[in-house]
Image (cartoon, coloured by chain):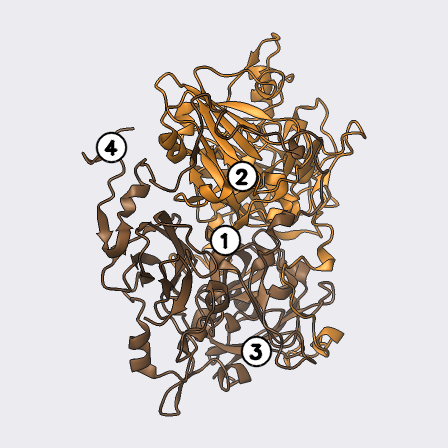
Chain colours: A orange, B brown
Amino acid sequence: MARKDNKPDGDLTPAAGNGILNRRLFLERTLMAGAGGIALGASGASAEPLTNPKWTMEPGAPFNPYGKPSRYEDKTVRQFAAPANPATPGVGSSRTPHHLLDGMITPNSLHFERSHGGVPDIDPQQHRLVIHGLVKKPLSFTMEALSRYPMTSRVSFIECGGNSGGLSAPAAAPLNVQGIHGLLSCAEWTGVKLSTLLDEAGVDPAAKWILAEGADSQSVSRSIPLAKALDDVLVCLYQNGERIRPENGYPVRLLVPGYSGNMNIKWLRRIKLVDAPIMTKDETSKYTILLPTGKAWQFVFPLEVKSTITRPSPGLDLKGPGFYEISGLAWSGNGKIVKVEVSADGGKSWAPAALQEPVLSKALTRFRAPWNWNGGPAILQSRATDDTGMVQPSRAQIIAERGLRGAYHFNVIQSWNVDEKGVLANVHA
Amino acid sequence: MARKDNKPDGDLTPAAGNGILNRRLFLERTLMAGAGGIALGASGASAEPLTNPKWTMEPGAPFNPYGKPSRYEDKTVRQFAAPANPATPGVGSSRTPHHLLDGMITPNSLHFERSHGGVPDIDPQQHRLVIHGLVKKPLSFTMEALSRYPMTSRVSFIECGGNSGGLSAPAAAPLNVQGIHGLLSCAEWTGVKLSTLLDEAGVDPAAKWILAEGADSQSVSRSIPLAKALDDVLVCLYQNGERIRPENGYPVRLLVPGYSGNMNIKWLRRIKLVDAPIMTKDETSKYTILLPTGKAWQFVFPLEVKSTITRPSPGLDLKGPGFYEISGLAWSGNGKIVKVEVSADGGKSWAPAALQEPVLSKALTRFRAPWNWNGGPAILQSRATDDTGMVQPSRAQIIAERGLRGAYHFNVIQSWNVDEKGVLANVHA
């Protein structure tokens, strides 16, 4: 148990203002004053004896072919707003409850959903993936044919281009991390490289883009540059080990690592090679960034570097002064996270957080920082940097750059206010 | 699309006997002859036109707070044997269907279960974790108190010490990969380092072991060396992001990375620091390795290096000669996998498989190798090596070393026979 330095155990010298401690506390074995358990008597049994609740005294439940969470966790669910039109209950989105999760993997049952025409109930025996257009040999694949190709797995986040757009509202809305950042999830995806299938079809040199289209009732479709399609795009069959869930594209979806969620076409039925983008609804009237001038940025693909603190956050109020772990998620559609800084004084001072290994390209990265709350007011923030050198901007920076009309790719620093009662709230700071 | 060598695309020169191809095929973009799609007419629409099944023509299903798999995947379930005693339906195990999965993560609903007294239905508000025995200050933790400590996440396999014991049967049983190797799963686990809690309690220098005990009706308990407890053991609250599932120890379990599954105490209620192992039932009458002499190896902790091919495997018969991906899992309780070799001729010749990144210590590692089946008989095998230099042994080696009475830690090379009809079966080879 040798220590790497000569500091006493539990060195609580601040690393930034308002109680942010040194992340090295996590690398050392240290006392976390104030966070701990209840001391028992010396016998280990007097102050709060070991009890024998009924579940220790009677046989438990038998086996279950496909398990589910404890009944005590029934609040850990996706959240969805009532649809704008009650006739289209499948149009909208449901959000991942990041304030109740930890780690980097999102369990499949809680992966966010975005659906433009509801979740189709597709028979995999009938479903086909067709590759056509500017190719030498158009091809049609059964799901079984696809499953014979070499596979690749990667842990990758998917984020809706509209995620966190709520932060563009002029006044800070009373939302929690799920309501603001819940259109974001991360899974281990497994599938066939699209490049393998395109090679078999034979790409015509005139092809510069692909059109990918889903088999849902809206035929959601997007144009993707051919260079990206030949780089790291996967035709996915598996999500965290098992076959992809219906709301995430069963039986087959596209994974376009780091690009807007909407481009990761679900229920994939067709890839057409074309010489120019097709200008579908979802790349013209939607998923573009409208500027104050009335013009819009189009084909802005990789999701920029971003982070948010997930705990503490609204709904997880503090139980009095003392030690807390600040835990959160950082990600970039351009590569790996190299640094996350945290602040407890609204950005006046920052200290680096610890990054949880493994740190993977275009995947969620969990960060952690120790914080000693003194019971006074605080504003918690996190700021991520990726391996291209891009730093997460403040809300003021984004507004100066592009105004507030275009809320896609809204990667601003999130601020959580902490009041003297320990109650957290979304604020613009 | 520059190539790293001058070989033509799709170089199918064997890397080992009976059709094993070079793993570099996966690094190149190559035609996978025979695995592919159905060619369409030049218009892309004649031979098999795009159809419009009903799910493309009508709105799909609305949102679901907690999702579930497609109804077409209802065979992807855990498998459990009928209990020896019908009065104890919760005593036994259920197995992960690895032949139907890909990647390294096991989804929570399919994580294997091993239960000695059924799954308790624990109220997290009432549950306590007590640390006592040879400590300066005995402590009792509520689940909320635990959740305030610094957390650590790691992807780790858990394997029952009795997994694959079926291969010790004198005659090869007609079992599939689930039946033989299904007491193995892998998840991202998140929790508090046990060392942090032990530091707070203050370890008495006389303590050399800990006893960990569960709150199930059997009070399953194991002795663990203190050095391991202070190394990488976690007191886990989360499994693949969400709170741990009931059958995996809700609300809190121990993760003892790389050690026998039985030591990863579920429903953890007590850790007692002691000066010598306690000799509980599960470290004396069970989970020891009985030798032909009648003596037994006890306290054999890390699970030795192991692997199995999951696809093709029994139940996933081949559909005629041509290209197949051999896909499987390798793992070691001693560290990282550094090499997996595959053979299609029962071990006469071997070629290295590709290892799927990230390769993590004490986690499942997915391997893949290309195979061109000529339609003749074959015996598929995999052989893993870890970073301590340990190589997975043949069945004959294990039998020579310790006989067949003790089937725990049975890490022998798995052989799948392929007959001329493409039917796969477990064989001893």
Discs 2/4, front: 2
Q: Residues within 10 Å of mark 1 (few under 14, many from 20)?
A: many
Tell me the subunit letter for badge 4. B
Marks 1/4: CA–CA distance: 32 Å
Q: Are marks 2 and 3 on the same chain?
A: no
Which callout, 3 or 4, points at the residue further toward the start of the chain? 4
Q: Which amino acid type is shown beneath numbered disc 4? A: Arg
Question: Do labels 2 and 4 touch, CB within 8 Å?
Answer: no
Q: Do labels 1 and 4 share a chain?
A: yes
Q: How crowded is mark 2: few (under 14 residues within 10 Å), some or many (20 or more)?
A: many
Which callout, 1 or 4, points at the residue further toward the start of the chain? 4
- Please state, as top left, top right, bottom left or bottom right, where the C terminus of chain B lies in the image: bottom left
Residue B221: assigned label: 3
Q: Is residue B333 left or right of residue A244?
A: left
Element type at mark 4:
loop
Give the residue number, with chain letter if any, for mark 4.
B3
Element type at mark 1:
loop
Question: Do labels 1 and 4 touch, CB within 8 Å?
Answer: no
Q: Nearer the viewer, residue B11 or A79?
A: B11
Q: Which amino acid type is shown beneath numbered disc 2? A: Val
Marks 2/4: CA–CA distance: 30 Å
Residue in view at x 47 percent, y 65 percent: B176
Give the residue number, with chain letter if any, for mark 2.
A252
